Image (spheres, grey):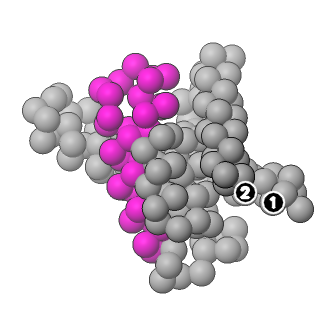
């Protein structure tokens, strides 16, 4: 039960931070996706079932806050979290540089997944530009490294 409460507190903290960033520092709020960072934290530290549960929960909360197609972010986060969690079972992702790489790869994979889902649903495809995608990937990587460091200091 302790892990469940930690997950809920983590999800609420990320939702609050993302909301506050979007409201008071919109440039930073658009440049980082803290929900992806949270799911990737679970992908490199937890088992795949926990990652899928967190991916679904984080995606649904993000869908509700962003007023997007309900379930789109939940599917993306669950799929990417599962894939990166599987990747993490083959490689050691306990150091900052591999975690940075996983966050960058997850952000790119999320963009491709969203484009594929929009095509399947028959929606208008708006693929982000290369510069915007690179900025989001690098920002998620940096936020993830800082977030992992902060969590490790809080837990110890």
Numbered circle sitting on residue 11:
none
Name the element at disc 2: helix
- Write down the residue under mark 2: 148
Residue at x 41%, y 62% (from the top left corner): 82
Q: Position of residue 141 (x, y in %)?
A: 60, 54
- Mark 1 residue element: helix
Q: Name the residue under label 1.
A: 152
Majority secondary structure of magenta residues: helix
Magenta segment: does it hold 144? no
Q: Percent from the top left, x then y, of residue 93? A: 61, 74
**In the rendered image of this protein, does residue 124 appear above or below residue 88?**
above
Q: Circles 2 and 1: CB distance less than 8 Å?
A: yes
Q: In this view, does 31 lie above or below 47?
A: above
Q: In this view, does 107 lie to the left or right of 70?
A: right
Which contiguous range is marked in magenta? 59-87
User: Is 14 above or below relative to 2?
Assistant: above
């Amino acid at each position: 039960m302790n892990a469940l409460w930690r997950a809920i507190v983590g999800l609420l903290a990320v939702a609050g931070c993302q909301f506050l960033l979007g409201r008071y520092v919109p440039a930073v709020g658009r440049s980082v996706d803290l929900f992806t960072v949270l799911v990737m934290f679970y992908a490199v530290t937890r088992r795949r079932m926990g990652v899928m549960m967190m991916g679904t929960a984080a995606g649904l909360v993000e869908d509700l806050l962003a007023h997007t197609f309900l379930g789109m972010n939940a599917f993306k986060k669950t799929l990417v979290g599962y894939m990166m969690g599987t990747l993490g079972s083959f490689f050691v992702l306990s150091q900052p540089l591999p975690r940075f790489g996983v966050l960058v790869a997850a952000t790119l994979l999320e963009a491709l997944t969203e484009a594929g889902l929009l095509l399947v649903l028959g929606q208008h495809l708006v693929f982000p530009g290369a510069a915007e995608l690179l900025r989001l990937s690098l920002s998620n990587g940096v936020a993830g490294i800082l977030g992992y460091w902060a969590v490790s200091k809080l837990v110890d």
